[in-house]
Amino acid sequence: MSEHEYSIIGHSRSRIGMYLAFAAGMLAGALAVGVSLLLTVARNAEYLDIPEIVLWPVTSAAVFGAMFFVFDRFVWRWWGIRSAIGIPDISGEWELDGISYDQNHEPKWQWSGKIEITQKYEKIFVWLRTSQVSIKGTPSILV
């Protein structure tokens, strides 16, 4: 079993990606300047000689990847962020009772169970465990 993507009506995941990319670009720029200063000091002290241009694309990709990983697993759950992006956090274990109907729309099975939901910003995993009993009280298995 694997996680699945899910969608929220009226929510654009690409917009969040755009904001993360913008923030990653800003942070990567700051890191590149900081690393450039450190390399200049190291070069002047004759410790090592690495061209600065090599670090720029690696820094941007690494910063975006790290930011997305942290956002996907943790940051989107923070109350202020969650309310701003409009995605509810439904992670947890939920008890439920249900009725299955036959083709004539008549109640056929009563059932109960638990749903365990593991949710990230981008994907969701839902595990359903049930114990079934027919309306008449006869134990049964739903397929």
Image (tube, grey):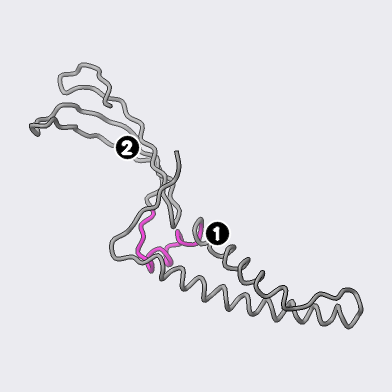
**Residue 121 screen position, x and y as percent:** 44, 57
Numbered label attached to residue 69: 1
In this picture, residue 133 sits left or right of residue 89? left
Disc 2 crowd rating (10 Å Cα; few below 14, some 14-19, many 20+) is: few
The image position of residue 72, as x and y in percent, is 49, 58
Q: Residue at x 71, y 73 (%)?
A: 55
What SS does tag 2 mark? strand
Quarter occupied by residue 133: top left
Can you say whether 44 is above or below 1 in the image? Answer: below
- 54 within the magenta span: no
The quadrant of the rendering that contains the C terminus is: top left
Name the residue located 72 percent from the left edge and 74 percent from the top edge: 54
Q: What residue type is labelled 1?
A: Phe
Q: Position of residue 34 (x, y in %)?
A: 72, 79
Q: Earlier in the sequence, mark 1 or mark 2?
A: 1
Residue 103 position (above or below residue 137): below
The image position of residue 2, as x and y in percent, is 45, 42
Please state which of residues 94 and 132 is positioned toward the viewer in this rendering: 132
Task: Tell which of 11 and 74 is nearer to you.
Answer: 11
Magenta-tinted stretch: 74-89
To which residue does mark 2 refer?
95
Q: In which quarter of the image is residue 57?
A: bottom right
Specify the principal SS of the magenta part: helix
Q: What amino acid does circle 2 point to? A: Glu
- Identified at 25% across, 19% down, the residue is 140
Q: Give the residue drawn at x 47%, y 73%.
A: 19
Quadrant where the image shows the N terminus: top left
Circle 1 sits in a helix, a strand or a loop, which is it? helix
- Category of crowding for the residue at label 1, using alpha-carbon neighbours closer than 10 angstroms: few (below 14), some (14–19), many (at least 20): some
